Image: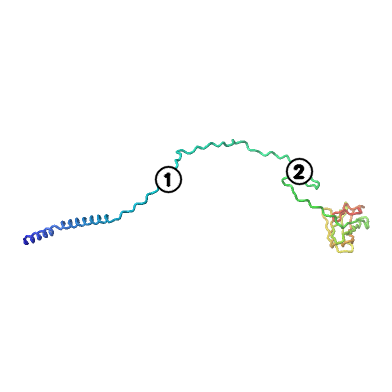
Amino acid sequence: MSGTRRRSSRAAATALASSPWLLVATGVVVMVVLLVVALTASRGREPETARPADLPATMALPDLPSSPPSRAPVALPAPGAPQLTPPRSDPPPGPTPSGRPASSAAGRDTRPESAPPPPSPVTGRYRVMEAWDDGFIGEVLLANAAAGPRPWTVRLVPPAGSRVASSWVEGAPQGTSRMSDGVFTYTSGVDLDGGASVALRFHLEHTGENTRLSGCTVDGAACAGL
C-alpha cells in the first residue's frame, strides 16, 4: 500500500517536473481565486454610505412669457426748421455829453465816471513888460491861493511868427521847459508856497508887432490879462 503511494507521488512529481507550464497555470488560478475571495470579503465589510438628506422640494418659478412684451410706439416730434433769433432792433449808440459813444446794454460800463479834478489854486496873469521892433518880454505872474505849497505848469502859445528865445523864474529856483507842436511848456522846479506869488518871464522874438499870446494857461486854467 505504501509502496503504491510512493510510486504515485513520484509519478506526479515526475509529471510536474516534465511539464512546468502546468505548475505556472495552477499558481495563477490559485492567485485569482484568492483575489476574488479578498474582494468579496472587503465589500461585505464596507459600511453602507450615508444617503444625503432629502433635498428640499424645488421652488416653482413663475411662468415667463414666451414672447417679449410689446413696446408702445413713442411719438417723436417732427423735425422742423431751426428757430432763428430775430435781429436786435437796439438803436445805435449815440454820443454822450462827455463825447464818448454810449455803450450797448450787453457791454455797458457800470463803473461810475471819475469826477473832474478840482481847479488848481495856482492862477496866472499875463502882461507885456517891454517890447521893441523884433521882440518883447512877457510875464505870467503866478499866485497860490492855497494854504500849502503847490506845483504848477504854464503853457504858452506864441503869436504867429514868434518863438520863445529864453525863459526864467524871477528870484526862485528854475524849472524845466520844452517846445512841442507850437506849444511852450514850463514846469516849476519847486512848489509855490501857500499865499505866495512868483513871476515866470520869457523873451519872445517875432517879425511883427503882435505881442498878444495865442494861448496861455496855468494848470489848465486860462490866464487873466489876455
Residue at image mark 2: 93
Where is residue 180 drawn, in percent x and y? 82, 55
The front one of 160 and 102 is 102
Q: Quadrant of residue 202?
A: bottom right
Q: Quadrant of residue 62?
A: top left
Residue at image mark 1: 59
Where is residue 104 drawn, in percent x and y? 74, 45
The front one of 121 and 208 is 121
Q: Secondary structure at mark 2?
A: loop
Query: Residue at coordinates 49% horizontally, 38% vertically from top-left?
Result: 69
Residue density around tag 2, few if under 14, some if 14–19, many if 20 or more, within 10 Å? few
Tell me the amino acid under the disc marked 2: Pro
- Count of numbered tags: 2
Q: Quadrant of residue 179?
A: bottom right
Tell me the amino acid under the disc marked 1: Met
Where is residue 193 drawn, in percent x and y? 87, 62
Q: Earlier in the sequence, mark 2 or mark 1?
A: 1
The front one of 155 and 88 is 88
Q: Secondary structure at mark 1?
A: loop
Query: Residue at coordinates 89% horizontally, 53% vertically from top-left?
Result: 213
Task: Name the front one of labels 2 and 1.
Answer: 1
Q: Is residue 123 left or right of residue 114?
A: right
State yes or no: discs 2 and 1 in contact (Cβ < 8 Å).
no
Q: Is residue 46 left or right of residue 62?
A: left
Q: Is residue 39 left or right of residue 163?
A: left
Gap between marks 2 and 1, in whole Å?
83 Å
Residue density around tag 1, few if under 14, some if 14–19, many if 20 or more, within 10 Å? few
